[in-house]
Amino acid sequence: MTADDSYQDFRQGASLTLSTPITRNMRVFTTIRDETVQATYIPLQDGADQASTSLGSRETRSVTLGLTRDTRRYRTSLFDPIGGGEDLISFEHSGGLLGGRNAFRKFTVESSRFYPSFWKFILALHLRASYLQDRSGVNPIYLFYERFWLGGIDTVRGYPDYSILPYQAGTKRIKEVDLPVPPTIGGNKMFYLNAEYRFPIHSMVRGLVFLDAGQVWNEGTPNPLKAFDPMVSVGIGVRLEIVAGFLLRLEWGVPLRALPVYNTSTGTIERRSFGPRLHFSMGPSF
């Protein structure tokens, strides 16, 4: 039984972002991206790697338009908001007149809020949701690196990285080659929620307790509300701000729900429980 198959990709390209303020707290931006990905799919069978399949080289040319609003207030550090919030709405278009081999549209909304509590405790909330409309007309395995996967320190802590995903093929668009649609290519719809209660330990050290929840759907689930079954975790963490604005994150998550995984031997979806997991990262959260 495995949580997912394996993918390898080599990327090269460039992106350019231009932005301008329209009010004191709001900005509009546009990003132009040209990226080529050489990818390989490695299916797993009974826990062992099988013969790999090259997915070739595919180029993505896209334009992203977005709007942000930032009203965050800070005490002493950009890593420690004490009030306000940040919102983002973006739309990415790839293919068509832009060229390239991939064609999709990606819609994203994201919001964070920070509420001061007693003393210096802060309640921090973060929500992100995205939808990918695949317009390539090919096997969706070719766009696995644009699709959605959850799990890990930046999404739903306590679960293995990229382990939360749907397991139905959910598509009929297979034209380029006769490849099966694997059950582990990620989804085209997702959301996740992070709730943290942060408190100071030292001038450069902060502790937190958290609750995370998130789910991924695919084309086989047109109405996510009818199949609402998020994975949920709780945990604690410590964050250390060091010289030059680096943030070290050490967070321990406990999954509260068994994760659906695909049994390659029987071809069925089964529930698998995971124990607590320790995550480490360098860089900001939300």
Image: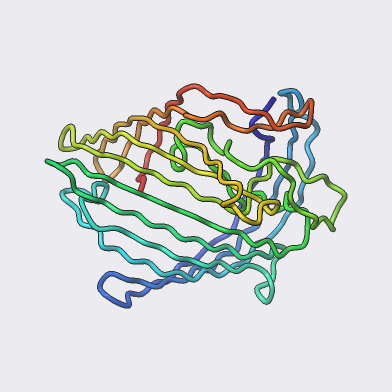
Q: Position of residue 82 (x, y in %)?
A: 20, 50
* In the image, residue 42 above or below residue 26: above
**Residue located farthest toward the right when viewing the structure as drawn:** 178
Picture quadrant where residue 34 is located: bottom right
Instruction: Identify the residue at horizontal 57%, vertical 58% (top origin).
Output: 131
Residue 232: % across, % down: 47, 36
Image quadrant occupied by the N terminus: top right
Residue depicted at 68% across the width and 61% down the height: 134
Front residue (pair 257, 286): 257
Q: Relative to the observer, which residue lies in front, 224 or 273?
A: 224
Quadrant assignment, res 237: top left
The residue positioned 50% from the left and 61% from the top of the image is: 108
Residue sitting at x 32%, y 71%: 26
Number of numbered callouts drawn: 0
Q: Quadrant of residue 201?
A: top left
Question: Looking at the image, is 276 positioned above or below residue 160?
Answer: above
Q: Is residue 177 left or right of residue 82?
A: right
What residue occupies the far left of the structure in this picture?
A: 119
Q: Is residue 176 left or right of residue 245?
A: right
Q: Residue furthest front?
A: 226
Q: Is residue 6 left or right of residue 247?
A: right
Query: In front: 199, or 283?
Result: 199
In the rendered view, how is the structure colored?
Answer: rainbow
Q: Does 150 sit above or below residue 270? A: below
Q: Position of residue 209 (x, y in %)?
A: 31, 33
Residue 25, percent from left and from top: 28, 69
